[in-house]
Amino acid sequence: MNPAEERLMELLLERGERALTDAETQELRTLVKQSDGWHQNDIDFAAAAAHFALDPPGETMPEALKARIIGDAVQRAAQMQSGNAPAARAVAAQVVAQPAANDDDQRPSRLGTWLGWSVAAAAAVFAVVGWQDQLLPAPSLAEQRAALVEQADAVTVAWSGTDDPAGGAVKGDVVWSESRQEGFMRFAGLPRNDPAQEQYQLWIFDGERDERYPVDGGVFDIDQKTGEVIVPIRAKVKVSQATLFAVTVEKPGGVVVSTRERLVAVAKPS
Amino acid sequence: MGETYLLQRVARGESAAMQACVEQYGNLVWSLARRLLKNQADAEDAVQEIFINLWENAARYDPRLGKEATFVALLARRRLIERLRARGRREDKHEADYDLSRLESFDHRRIEASSDVRRAAVALEGLPTDKRKVVALSVVEGMTQSEIADRLSMPVGTVKSHLRRGLAAVRDAMKRGARREAAP
């Protein structure tokens, strides 16, 4: 491999581990265009094939899960046939808000959640231009955040730390677009958490809801000791008028109603 | 109708094709999810999400880039690795249980799979065992390069180099094979 290909490989591999910076993303695109026959997804294809070569699939999908997926698929197909299918989502959920219970038989279909998010997500779909750009990686979180900041109704509010041991050094901001029901949190100084012990959870206070029951904005983790972390907001229901963003520390998986014992950051739109 | 066309039918919204897709690739996706996520409930949630993602991206499948099964695996792995990353990544690090000793005598002839995977297996067989281990921990366990360095007591720079060269070898083998297949 020549140095350019080495660098290309390096970026492709880094992309699998973290969100590339905007500069790195641009560099990657340039290197691919200048390369001799490389495609953005070559390494992902190679990794997928290598995975099966090294560890052939041997598990059988649970029948109940298969039935749920097929049920979703049938609904999806009906929507597509009627022309009502939402546009493709740009990004898969990156924050995993786990159900409070793990009763497999009562786990909900994802379709409802997916439909609920589709409006906001459709707005984030990126253009696919030509064969070379097919299946480009989803825009980095930094890119998505930057695009959202440009929205006319986007509000950006700085975090304030608290007296909590985890909240003393918090810096960063939250950007939220009401029309898109989409937002991103940016943190520096929020300590790394052990997801097996506790997780961070965002709460969005809505001026049109009882303040005792803020909207769950998703559970998330901080997995790096230093540097800036960007976390997408996944509000579970529509937020009509965001009046306060608050981050608490909760048990793994998050809670339905927080006791607010450990409040680590707040951001109040003016 | 060959497997190449299944995703094209999915992209047209054919319910039967979607169901066939679940039947054909369900175990594959489930195996990936169980390997990478360990937790059953999390894996189930992820697999549902992966199939939704597959319906949305079916039209993007291009057989020139790889076999359909490899494409499905690519999408699945991407979503699963995103989950790992979003969840603080290695809460289950201690459960990384891929048996590296099986790589000591890796033999591609034992692999019964699509041409993509067979080519990958041949390329992997040609690698030194150290490189093969690095590739395995990366692609099978989803470990980061620094985690692999810790696991194998190897400098991070060496891990990065091994991974680049190892996956480049697999990629080159797949490309060569695809060109031969496409040749008249």
Image (cartoon, rainbow, N blue to C red):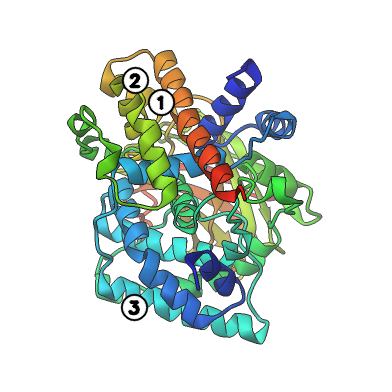
Q: Same chain for marks 1 and 2?
A: yes
Q: Residues within 10 Å of mark 1 (few under 14, many from 20)?
A: many
Q: SS of the residue at dot 1? A: helix
Q: Which residue corresponds to mark 3?
A: A67
Q: Is residue A144 left or right of residue B94?
A: right
Q: CA distance from mark 2 to mark 3?
A: 41 Å
A72 is higher (above) or lower (below) than B7? below
Q: CA distance from mark 1 to mark 2?
A: 6 Å
Q: SS of the residue at dot 2? A: helix
Q: Is residue B179 left or right of residue A129?
A: left
Inspect the image, locate mark 1, and give the three-letter code of the amino acid beneath it.
Gln
Q: The disc numbered 2 marks a residue on which chain?
A: B
Image-quadrant location for residue B14: bottom right
Inspect the image, locate mark 2, and give the three-letter code of the amino acid beneath it.
Ala
B15 is higher (above) or lower (below) than B28? below
Image-quadrant location for residue A3: top right
B129 is higher (above) or lower (below) than B73? above
Q: Residue B108: image x %, image y %?
A: 30, 39
Q: CA distance from mark 3 to mark 1?
A: 37 Å
Q: Which residue corresponds to mark 2?
A: B149
Q: Residue A84: image x %, image y %?
A: 66, 81
Q: SS of the residue at dot 3? A: helix
The residue under the point 40% across, 30% down is B144
Q: Are marks 1 and 2 in contact (CB under 8 Å)?
A: yes
Q: If the image is split into quadrants, where does the N terminus of chain A sit?
A: top right
Q: Residues within 10 Å of mark 2 (few under 14, many from 20)?
A: some
Q: Residues within 10 Å of mark 3 (few under 14, many from 20)?
A: few
Inspect the image, locate mark 3, and give the three-letter code of the amino acid beneath it.
Ala
Q: Residue B183: image x %, image y %?
A: 61, 47
